[in-house]
Image (tube, rainbow, N blue to C red):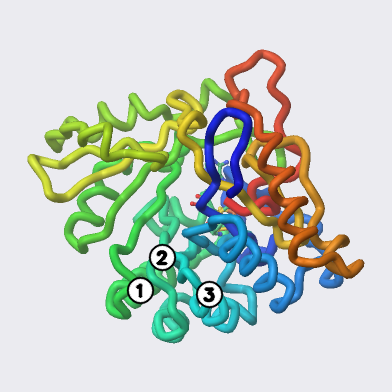
Amino acid sequence: MLSDSYGRVATDLRVSLTDRCNLRCAYCMPAEGLDWLPKPELLTDDEVVRLIRIGVERLGIREVRFTGGEPLLRRGLAAIVAETARLHPRPELSITTNGIGLARLAGPLREAGLDRVNVSLDTLRPESFRRLTRRDRLDDVLAGMAAAAAAGLTPVKVNSVLMRGINDGEARDLLRFCLERGYELRFIEQMPLDAQHGWRRANMVTADEIGRELEQEFALKPEDPDARGSAPAEAFLIDGGPARVGVIGSVTRPFCGACDRVRLTADGQVRNCLFAREESDLRDALRAGASDDELAARWRRAVAGKLPGHGINDPAFLQPDRPMSAIGG
Ligand code: SAM
Ligand code: SF4
């Protein structure tokens, strides 16, 4: 098992398949993009699958989520999904994607064994989409979501980050849009993980604000907190249910005490937290001929040292060196 000194056990693995992206979301990257990792530094498809296998077969990983950067840009994605789906016990398989290209890939990914998708969509207005992502691709994202639902990658979950002055007036529109289509919407508080270090607490649209905004139109009833488990989203039943909306108060309502996640970056580093300031290398060890046992032992040590919380609210908080896009969101 991957346990830490605070009694938490990591069973949910986030695997970043690339740090590259075809959008430039303002809360994530600068307009000019970033210096992408050179190809030789990235794990190959076989290396990714080997590490996931060790996680599943030896370390108790039960859920694998592929992310990035934009995971749909990884050419070998469907093959990696197919190999992962063959593992025993078969993990739950999902991706977090911006949805561009999903219209074409939803069917093949479903066939490869993918169970679900989370699509990130922050606005329904083409002009705000262009401003927020610096690209004109809203229609591609909407088509991708529809294709995912049609392919059975359900429930389609939608992640939205609200930015003050850009899309903070759209919470209710986004919820209405998702309810009409049977998508499950979750709002995520903006976190200090952007490459340009532009996050300011005062600008963050908080979970409380989002709740108040939604309540102007919908009756929200908190779901049984026992049902939440390690899920980061606080779930609310809408107008008596069964439809729900989630609010992830990563900053103002941290859920670190129940965290069950561990991350593998595209260049083969284990991170025990999004906000960790240290990483543990698996790639160089693997390329130097380490056995599965040795890699598993390194991975266990990396999780054992996990801190109790992300520390964003500590005065001494320091943002991690790598941005979200390079860690894997
Ligand atoms: N490119 C894919 C996407 O956008 O879904 C996967 C990677 S992205 C880093 C994963 C998630 O992190 C997205 O839902 C995105 O909105 C969210 N995200 C990125 N930067 C963030 C930030 N600074 N605060 C909160 N969420 C953020
Ligand atoms: Fe790309 Fe996702 Fe970052 Fe947006 S949030 S720039 S889609 S990695």
Residues under numbered marks 1 and 2 in contact, where contact means CB atoms less than 8 Å apart: yes
Residue 5: quarter of image = top right
According to the picture, the residue beneath numbered tag 2 turns out to be 117
Residue 301: quarter of image = top right
Residue furthest to the top: 315
Ligand 1 is within 8 Å of the C-beta of the residue at disc 3: no
The image shows residue 281 at horizontal and vertical percentages of 81, 53
Q: Amino acid at mark 2?
A: Val
Ligand 1 is within 8 Å of the C-beta of the residue at disc 1: no
The image shows residue 328 at horizontal and vertical percentages of 62, 54
> In front: 46, or 37?
46
Q: Residues within 10 Å of mark 3 (few under 14, many from 20)?
A: some
Q: Is residue 284 left or right of residue 250?
A: right
According to the picture, the residue beneath numbered tag 1 turns out to be 148
Give the mark nearer the N terminus: 1 vs 2: 2
The residue positioned 81% from the left and 67% from the top of the image is 291
Q: Amino acid at mark 3?
A: Leu
Is 191 located above or below residue 18 in the figure?
above
Between disc 3 and disc 1, the foreground one is 3
Give the mark nearer the N terminus: 3 vs 2: 3
Residues under numbered marks 3 and 1 in contact, where contact means CB atoms less than 8 Å apart: no
Give the mark nearer the N terminus: 3 vs 1: 3
According to the picture, the residue beneath numbered tag 3 turns out to be 87
Q: CA distance from mark 1 to mark 2?
A: 7 Å
Which label was assigned to residue 209? none
Q: CA distance from mark 3 to mark 1?
A: 24 Å
Provide the secondary structure element on which disc 2 rests. Answer: strand
